[in-house]
Amino acid sequence: KNSDSLAGVCKLANVNRFLAKAICLVRGSELVQTEEGLSIRVFSEIPWFSLRERYTFSGNALNKRRDFRRGEMDCTMERTSTGLKFLMKWPEPWGGTEETYYVLVGDHTLHVKTTNTITQSDGVPKSISYTTIYHRRH
């Protein structure tokens, strides 16, 4: 199975076309376990687009918004029976939430299952779900 397109979430979040292109060209992520929790870096074929986020097992963490708007996301992470669960919340404009599950499938494949709910300009929240699949490189 291939990853789902990220074009839908870009449209839902009303990001500009340059950022949408960078998001749609995401090519990988790097996960590093730290003493406090987890550090995640997401990178794209577009050199200027790179996200770095840190999460702790013992509480909330603040990370920059992924849509590059001002403000931060309030983030939590917890272990589940199948992997990790992340919850994120960010304020207006285009405020919303994200619920993401990291599930390791076999030794070399990671499924990242995400649901975003984003408040639209008319004040109505809308949701989209998608799966991104990563394969470990040796």
Image: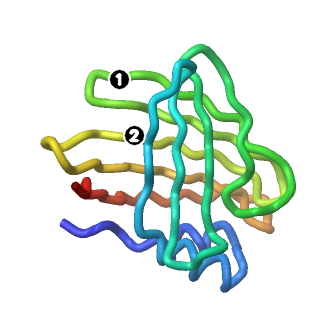
Q: Earlier in the sequence, mark 2 or mark 1?
A: 1
Residue 56 lies, in percent from the top left, at 58, 24
Element marked by disc 2: strand
Residue placed under numbered mark 1 in the picture: 80
> As rendered, which of 129 and 80 lies closer to the eye?
80
- Picture quarter containing residue 50? bottom right
User: Which quarter of the figure is the N terminus placed in?
Assistant: bottom left
Amino acid carrying label 1: it is Thr
Amino acid carrying label 2: it is Tyr
Q: Is residue 1 left or right of residue 103?
A: left
Residue 117 lies, in percent from the top left, at 60, 52
Residue 135 lies, in percent from the top left, at 25, 57
How many labels, in total? Answer: 2
Marking on residue 101: 2
Mark 2 and mark 1: span between their CA atoms? Answer: 9 Å
Residue drawn at x 53%, y 19% as measured from the top left: 35
Q: Are marks 2 and 1 in contact (CB under 8 Å)?
A: yes
> As rendered, which of 89 and 32 lies closer to the eye?
32
Q: Is residue 70 left or right of residue 3?
A: right
Residue sitting farthest toward the bottom: 17
> As rendered, which of 43 and 58 lies closer to the eye?
43
Residue drawn at x 83%, y 53% as measured from the top left: 92
Element marked by disc 1: loop
Determine crowd level at label 2: few under 14, some 14-19, many 20+ residues with C-alpha closer than 10 A.
many
Residue drawn at x 51%, y 71% as measured from the top left: 44
| Above or below 131: residue 10 | below
